[in-house]
């Protein structure tokens, strides 16, 4: 309820989308992680700073309760948040 009233970003807005605890930007970063991109590459592709990418990665790991980028990618793939064919359609 608090996030609705204070304008905080929500994990999803479309009731047809699967629930995940990540913001839209965190999901973009996570998709790039599953594509094997480095923080530097992610920063360049999304037009954000390297430090901002690091902050997003830290937040993703915390929210998913995983220890590293590989675990985060596997977590997202297993839950269907990201598909392997997304990698080839969005290089």
Image (spheres, rainbow, N blue to C red):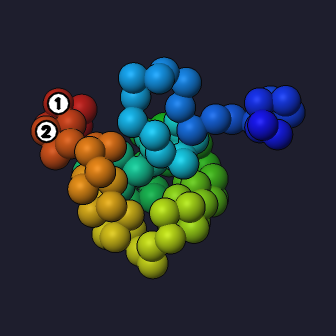
SS assignment at label 1: helix
Query: In the rendered structure, are the residues bearing label 2 and label 1 in contact, judged by CB atoms less than 8 Å apart?
Result: yes
Can the viewer see residue 60 in this picture? yes
Relative placement, left or right, of 27 versus 9 is left
**Residue 24's disc number:** none
Can the viewer see residue 44 in this picture? no
Camera-side residue: 16 or 80? 16
Outermost residue toward the right in this view: 6
Question: x and y percent of residue 64 in the render?
Answer: 49, 63
For label 2, the residue is 85
Q: CA distance from mark 2 to mark 1?
A: 6 Å
For label 1, the residue is 89
Outermost residue toward the bottom in this view: 67
- Residue in the image at 45% along x and 59% along y: 39
Relative placement, left or right, of 35 versus 63 is left
How many callouts does the rendering have?
A: 2
Camera-side residue: 27 or 53? 27
Question: x and y percent of residue 56 in the render?
Answer: 58, 55
């Amino acid at each position: 309820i608090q996030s609705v009233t204070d304008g905080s970003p929500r994990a999803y807005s479309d009731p047809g989308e699967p629930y995940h605890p990540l913001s839209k930007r965190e999901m973009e970063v996570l998709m790039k992680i599953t594509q094997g991109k480095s923080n530097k590459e992610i920063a360049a592709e999304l037009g954000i700073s390297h430090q901002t990418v690091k902050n997003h990665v830290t937040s993703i790991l915390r929210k998913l309760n995983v220890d590293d980028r590989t675990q985060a990618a596997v977590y997202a793939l297993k839950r269907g948040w990201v598909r392997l064919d997304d990698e080839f359609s969005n290089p």
